[in-house]
Every structure is written in structure tokens, then in C-alpha cells.
Amino acid sequence: MSQTKPIRPDSQIITVQQHIVQQQEAHSPDSRGTFSWLLSGITLATKMIQSRIRRAGLVDGALGAEGATNVQGEQQQKLDVFANNALIHCLGGRDAVSVLVSEENEEPVTFDRAPGTGKYVVVFDPLDGSSNIDVNVNVGTIFSIYRSPKPADGHKPSLDEEVLQSGLKQVAAGYVVYGSSTMFVYTAGFGVYGFTLDPAVGAYVLSHDNMKMPQQGQYYSTNEANQRSFPPHYGTYLDELRDGKLGKAYSSRYIGSLVADFHRTLLKGGVFLYPPTKSHASGKLRLMYEANPIAFITEQAGGVATDGRNRILEIQPTDIHQRTPLVLGSRTEMEAFERARLAAGA
Ligand code: AHM
Ligand code: MG
């Protein structure tokens, strides 16, 4: 007689929601409910964004430029605006959020919350890699979460004190890469975890446990068209990689979406560089919603992230939209970069 096996869900499946709650139980039981509710606002918004991206070529009016420019003077794409609205809508409805800072908004978005709520500041780049949107190449969302400083002597912190916190103060950071699959990668300071969106279930499911960046990789990633305007030691360093001075013949990979270029660097190792250039003397990438969250993840995965000289996480921001050079990657490549910088006296 044949026996019918009971149908039951795979007990190994861990969703991002479960994982966040488990991490909070283990590390900060006080904030567990609030924090996971807040993060669920981000995962919900990114599911809305990914669904729009997946259908962008089919939906009338989803692709192309919006017609406006953002605070960076860059043309906003329709999907930039959609992604920004989705995040503001999903996070603005959660009373744990006191302030939102977005690449697409010149000023922070503030909320008048009841006392005892509004504990967190969320900073984000809603859709990173705008130049890749219309051509079906990977883009991403990047976010960073800070605690609002507690009132001192009964005085509420100023808006600047709330938002201009160094990367060291991040409570959590992460990104979603809209690639061949949609992946959510985050850290709350206890390792880096990656979740793949299962489209059939509509949930992010743990697929990359405790991610570590390899000690050395075989790719460098930079916009080589700008190399003549990099400070000279960047060129010397790239030549060392090309010439096999680190024991490997390096290959080049550059997508032009930070999230995608970083995601590869996290998984495969190597080095990513966006140095100062002639047109962007302070670098192009933004400290608060690009460099800081990515640097937090890099360090949590065992890598190194600097502005070419100093640790990214230690930079005190003076403006929510400030730019920074960014050099990050595996330890071996980052040590070689530092040697090249010191040898050049830069
Ligand atoms: P964006 O936020 O307007 O999309 O710009 C940031 C992007 C990054 O994703 C990427 O690393 C960089 O700009 C690419 O710049 P470039 O085209 O100068 O190489
Ligand atoms: Mg960006």
C-alpha cells in the first residue's frame, strides 16, 4: 500500500521579516517591534518598485525622463519619481519614522509625530543607476537607518542634529538590486544577509547567509573613461592591477550602477573606485545615501571602504547631499591602494 506524504512548507525557509525579528530578539529586544515594522515599509516599497521595473517596457509612460531635474541638477527619470513616491508613501505611514532624507528631495521630509514615536531617520537613494533605467540594465535602491538623537535637557534635537550623523551611527543599512532576480541585502551591525525575492510567494527569502567579501578578487571596477583626470596615484594603482603585481591578472567590470557594481564586489571581491575627477572634484557619489550604507555593509562583510584616504564611516556630514570619492573592496586590493597612495605622498 502506498503512503501519501503530508504536504508541508519547507521548514528551512526564512523570510526577511522573520530574520529581522530574530536578530532584534538576539541583539536589541527593546526596539524589536518598531524596527521590524519600519523595515517592512522598505521591503514593501521595494516590491512595488521592482514590480514597476519588471513591467516598465510594457506600461505606457513608465520609462523616460520626467522633465524635472533633482537637487543634483540631474534629470529625473519617471521611475526615479515612482520609486521615491513609493518609499515616502510606505515609510511616511509608519509612526516610527521622524524624518526621511531622499536623493530626490532637496530638503528632508519631516513628520509631526506623537511623543514617544518617531524614533528613526531613514535616508535613501530610491533608484540608483538612473542612466541604466531605460536600457534594461540593473538598478537598485539604497537605504540607511539612524536613531533620532534623544532630547538633551528637554530640548528636541535640531533637524541638522537628527539627519547629519556620521555613518558610524547607522543602525542598519541595505540595498535592493533589481537584477536578473531581485535581492535585498542588509546589515543591522551583526553581519550581512541577502534575501532573494521569490516572485511566486511575494516574499524575500534568505538565500545568502552571513555574507563575506573574499580577501582578494580579480576585478577592478571604475569608469576608465575618466582615468586621465583621476589623481595620478589612482592610475599607478590601476596599472599595478593590470600588470599582475598582486599576483593575478585583473579584469575590468563596470556597470555604472553603484548597487550592481557593489553587489558583484561583495560576492566576488576586488575593488570599486569612484575617484575625484575633473567634472566632480569631490567625487560623484553621495555620502549619506550611497557611500555610507555601502561602506557599512562592506565593513560588516570584512572589506574596507574609504574616500581614498579616510574611513567613509568616520566622515562627519555637513550637507545631506554632499559628495565623496569612494574606494572600497577586498582587503588585499585596499591595502595595495593604500601603499600606492603613500608611495605617491598623496
Ligand atoms: P544616480 O544616483 O543619479 O543614478 O548616479 C549614481 C550613479 C551610481 O550608481 C554609479 O556608480 C555612478 O553614478 C556612475 O557614474 P558614471 O556614469 O559617471 O560612471
Ligand atoms: Mg544614486
Image (spheres, rainbow, N blue to C red):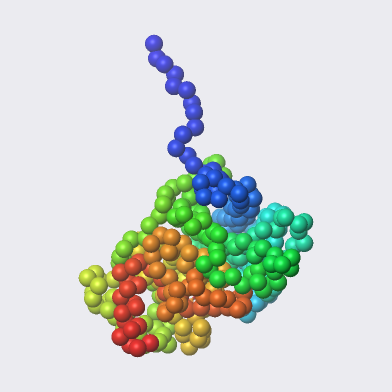
Whether residue 86 sits left or right of residue 25 in the image: it is: right
Q: Residue furthest front?
A: 153
User: Where residue 306 sits: x, y (%)?
Assistant: 43, 74
User: Where residue 210 sits: x, y (%)?
Assistant: 41, 52
For image coordinates 65% across by 60% down, the residue present is 120
Residue 67 lies in what quarter of the image?
A: bottom right
For image coordinates 32% across by 73% down, the residue present is 335
**In this orientation, which residue lies closer to the viewer: 116 or 253?**
116
Residue 169 lies in what quarter of the image?
A: bottom right
As displayed, is residue 132 above or below residue 48? Answer: below
For image coordinates 54% across by 45% down, the residue present is 25
Whether residue 232 sits left or right of residue 172 in the image: it is: left
Image quarter hosting the N terminus: top left
Q: Is residue 34 visible?
A: yes
User: Where residue 148 sits: x, y (%)?
Assistant: 65, 63
As displayed, is residue 198 above or below residue 304? Answer: above
For image coordinates 23% across by 76% down, the residue present is 245
Whether residue 223 sits left or right of residue 333 in the image: it is: right
Q: Residue furthest top?
A: 1
Image quarter hosting the C terminus: bottom left
As displayed, is residue 10 above or below residue 24? Answer: above
Q: Is residue 199 visible?
A: no
